[in-house]
Amino acid sequence: MHRPLKRLINVRDRQQRAQLSAGRAPADAEIEAGLEYLKAEPMKEYEERRAAKEKAEFESVAQRVASLRAGIEAKRDFWLAESDLKAVIDGGGSGASDGDRPSNPITSAQAADAAH
């Protein structure tokens, strides 16, 4: 039995014994209200545990999505940097305007031929 539920039952029993010893029997409505509370309390605990579990699952999924997004962005940045590097090596994409570029850029193929 749940510890809070057992504690509530003990409190209810003590109240009933006190009322009986004082010469007053508890009203049926009081007993029913106490029983409804006892039934609702475990459900409330269950709902709180369930909500905490769902929150943890959501946070886990959110972290995974953020991780995947960061990975995708890192790959994109890599491919953009590699593309820029190849363009610079091949003589284009240096970021300079057309007037600033050398008139006869040396390509990597021409540089390799010149080295042999």
Image (tube, rainbow, N blue to C red):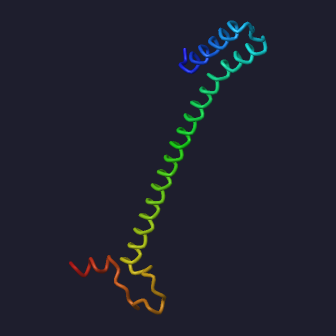
Q: Quadrant of the C terminus?
A: bottom left
Return the residue nearer the eye: 58 or 86. 58
Q: Is residue 19 left or right of residue 104?
A: right
Residue beneath the point at 52% across and 49% down: 65
How far across and how far down the image is residue 59, in percent? 53, 43
Q: Residue at x 74, y 11 (%)?
A: 26
Which residue is more in the foreground, 62 or 47? 47
Q: Compare residues 111 and 8 and report the one nearer the observer.
A: 8
Direction from residue 44 to residue 24 in the image, left or right: right
- Quarter location, residue 109: bottom left
Query: What residue is rendered at 45% in x and 55% in y?
Result: 71
Image label count? 0
Q: Is residue 24 above or below residue 45?
A: above
Question: Horizontally, is 12 left or right of 86 in the view?
Answer: right
Q: Position of residue 82 (x, y in %)?
A: 40, 68
Outermost residue to the left: 116
Above or below for 84 versus 98: above
What quarter of the picture does the N terminus occupy? Answer: top right
Residue 21 percent coordinates (x, y): 68, 6
